[in-house]
Amino acid sequence: MYIKKILWIIALLGLVALGIFSYSVYNSIFSPNTKFENKTATVYIPTGATYQIAIDSLRPLLDDLSSFDAVAQKKGYAANIKAGKYILKKGMNNNDLVNVLRSQNTPVSVVFNNQERLEELAGRIAVQIEADSISLLKTMQDDVFLNANNLNKQEALGLYIPNKYEFFWNTSAEGFRERMLTEYEKFWNQERLDKAKEIGLTPNQVTVVASIVQKETAKVDERPKVAGVYMNRINNGWKLEADPTVIYAIKEQSGNFDTIIKRVLYKDLKLESPYNTYMNITLPPGPIAMPDISSIDAVLNYGKHEYFFFVADVENFGYHKFAKNLAQHNRNKQAYVQWINKQGVKR
């Protein structure tokens, strides 16, 4: 009887120990293990991260790091770290946390527009994905890539069609560039290629004209009309004589693209630069800014009219007054010059 009693006690103690162990395991796996107050928290795991780097990234967000570590080790996460952006929800347990980190890389929205140079574009993208601005710029300017796609460094900005795109945060510089090439080829579909051919321009030339239209007017509804002026000039063998190209030439020669120029002076029109359309009958060698899709389509579907000139309309700000001949244009221009002088704008 005594021995039997001892065995029962041992068995009972074993069951208690097993229960305690099972409860501990259950808690480590299925009990909530977050300590942030918001509904969600974001963690970024960089490319090439070690398990320790991942743990350090998670440390401020977890209540019990050791229990997470135990589950992560058991589920093989420690040996299979995946880079990316991960969204953690308040109250998640260790099992959920590991599952998210293993398979739920969340895309980010990448948005860009209005950049004047590749340098600016690289900086804009670098704050939205993992790739840094130096690697992005180097990749964008890669001669092998540009030559393979019939582009040069002056034309390269036109490859990047401004829009909103989804990327994984850990996208590399090369990955970003290749995706943008795919988007460029999708944008320049057969319909747009046919329209470009119909108006006698290549896609690169359309982008250059569109960049000038973009700089001339912020009014989307006016862009086809402005594009029509430039196409009338091109079709009649005239110089474009576009002030934004002069402004770009000034910035390009000075190397200071942060300069704000509100007024083009007569001396500026004589600046020797391939971008100065007062001096050259040819188009600039590349876009002077990143044109919106609306500007590109405005060129492809430019307004058919007889206007060859336009100047800012001081009675309807943001829009322009259009003229068919120089005499009419000079009258319109006089009103603008009087207005800008009254504003005290010297440069």
Image (cartoon, grey):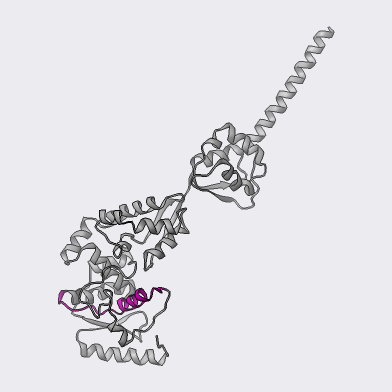
Q: Position of residue 3 (x, y in %)?
A: 82, 8
**The quadrant where residue 346 appears:** bottom left
Relative vertical location of residue 46 with respect to residue 283 in this rendering, above or below: above
Q: Position of residue 303 (x, y in %)?
A: 22, 73
Assign the C terminus to one quadrant of the image: bottom left
Q: Which residues are magenta?
A: 235-257
| Drawn side of residue 11 relative to residue 180, left or right | right
Left or right, residue 183 beside residue 302: right
Quadrant of residue 185 in the image?
A: bottom left
Residue 319: percent from the left, percent from the top? 33, 80
* Residue 121 drawn at (x, y percent): 40, 63
Front in this rendered view, residue 136 or 16: 136
Q: Nearer the viewer, residue 40 or 234?
A: 234
Count of numbered circles in the view: 0
Q: Residue at x 34, y 90 (%)?
A: 337
Question: Does residue 255 show up magenta in the picture?
Answer: yes
In the image, is residue 104 part of the stretch drawn in magenta?
Answer: no
Query: Is 139 or 171 nearer to us in this picture?
Result: 139
Q: Residue furthest top?
A: 1
Assign the N terminus to one quadrant of the image.
top right
Depicted 200 relative to depicted 101: above or below: below
Q: Residue at x 28, y 69 (%)?
A: 210
